[in-house]
Amino acid sequence: MASKDVTDPARMEKIVSLCKRRGFIFQSGELYGGLNGVWDYGPLGVELKRNLKEHWWRRTVQERDDVLGMDGAILTMEQVLTASGHVGGFSDPMVDCKTCKGRFRADNLEASQCKEKPSVCPGQSPKCELTEPRQFNLMLQTNFGATGEQTAYLRPETAQSIFVQYRNVLDSSRVKLPFGIAQIGKSFRNEINPRNFTFRSREFEQMEVEYFCHPDDGLRLTDEWLEARLAFYEEIGIPRDKLHVLDVPDGERAFYSKKTYDIEYAFPFGVQELEGVAYRTDYDLGVHQKGSGKPLEYFDEETRARFLPHVVEPSAGCDRTVLALICEAFDEETVTDDKGAQEVRTVLRFKPTMAPVKVGIFPLLKKNADQVRIARDIQKTLQAWMNVFYDDSAAVGRRYRRQDEVGTPFCITVDFDTLGENGPELRDTVTVRHRDSMAQERVRIDALLPWLLERVR
């Protein structure tokens, strides 16, 4: 079970530094000073995030008969968010410090730092002078049309587009309860105090299911979805002993929820939420039925009964999960080279399914035309099936270290044995080096593709 009291700021600093240095995550607009709470994913980060989303989609939609997918628009009608309760009700209490001009969430001061004295929370320094709390609108509003006459919002969550399209999906797909609608997409919140790298951002991506069911099945299905989500995190490389399940008590849940579990992960900055699994009852379809004036009841052909389906919502933060994967994979170990010298090896121990680059491909000597030709042929063969990286600069040991640092699980080296120069028995084989153990083995070139596919998918 994850401990809520353990933090490791030094480890987090190393992770943030690695993310920028190796092209995982950059601050948006950094060239111009940066946009606070907004992040860009670099070449490796976008591959990691893509692997996560594809794996989530495969497990959640493609491999289930009871979940369908959709992709809703980001721009959301004001009427939709008025009916859902977001307009006029989606806000956090905010306080200002008259001394440092900082702004903080009034209900979470203990997690913030005073700008003039970071060792204490806002309000704890004698210099702090906090204003009275006031409500701060978390939604980002926009106007469009020829004269800007129409108001819309950048959606604060992906859920509402699913609820609004529930009837269309039901009718067009001819599904029966229980069934789910899944979506991966961007959401936007005008956070008062973005913090902890990408964990709390103003633009973020969600992986979400709205699972519609009979009212009698809601609580049971909530527990089933909780177990399914915990198993998913284990599968992608986040062990259960790093997870904490919070059964949100009465009074702290949303008013419409009968049961909510928060799945939390032990980040270096503390235990924080990755995903919520909430039993939302029939609140959402109820407010949209009332707001639109159109019936959203489900007709059960067996019982001949009409009722509003209840909803179980597993809602995961994609960016938070990417960050958790990086934090969990990050490792430093002291190794001894062939000459007896010790060095620190930095390695990201991603599960191969999540790793941004699956295989590094090297000719032992870049001046050896035959080695380069064979390495390039291997690269061309594997590229159609997985993301690979060709590298011929510096010594092979240096190349291994570079691939360790970005989490590449396997490296292939074309050497003199491949050419048969040390005997015919190893001709047309290559050295495959394993990232975690650093062990090496010989694999025939014509067997490389199936050998790798078995291990990286």
Image: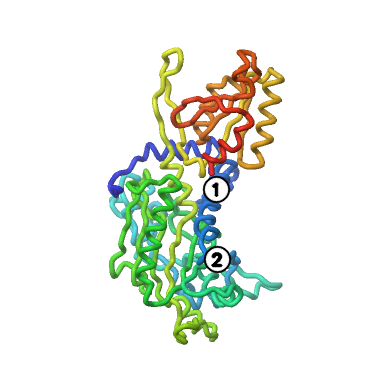
Give left or right: position of 77 versus 332. Answer: right
Between disc 2 and disc 1, whose residue precedes?
1
Alpha carbons under labels 2 and 1: distance apart: 20 Å
SS category of the residue bearing label 2: strand
Give left or right: position of 2 versus 425. Answer: left
Which of the two residues, 190 or 243, is positioned nearer the viewer here? Answer: 243
Quadrant for residue 69, please give it.
Answer: bottom right
- Residue density around tag 2, few if under 14, some if 14–19, many if 20 or more, within 10 Å: many
Q: List x then y, in percent, for residue 115.
A: 39, 48
Quadrant for residue 307, please give it.
Answer: bottom left
Which of the two residues, 389 or 440, is positioned nearer the viewer here? Answer: 440
Q: Amino acid at mark 1?
A: Asn
- Give the numbered dot on residue 9: none
Give left or right: position of 166 versus 109. Answer: right
Q: Which residue is mark 2?
A: 68
Q: List x then y, in percent, for residue 10.
A: 37, 37
Q: Amino acid at mark 2?
A: Leu
Q: Which residue is mark 1?
A: 51
SS category of the residue bearing label 1: helix
Residue positioned 41% across, 54% down in the render = 274
Q: Quadrant of the C terminus?
A: top right
Residue positioned 62% across, 70% down in the render = 143
Specify whether residue 26 is in view: no
Specify whether residue 444 is in view: yes
- Residue density around tag 1, few if under 14, some if 14–19, many if 20 or more, within 10 Å: some
Residue positioned 71% across, 25% down in the render = 373
Q: Is residue 92 above or below residue 438?
A: below
Q: Is residue 203 above or below residue 353?
A: below
Q: Extreme front residue here?
A: 425
- Camera-nearest label, 2 or 1: 2
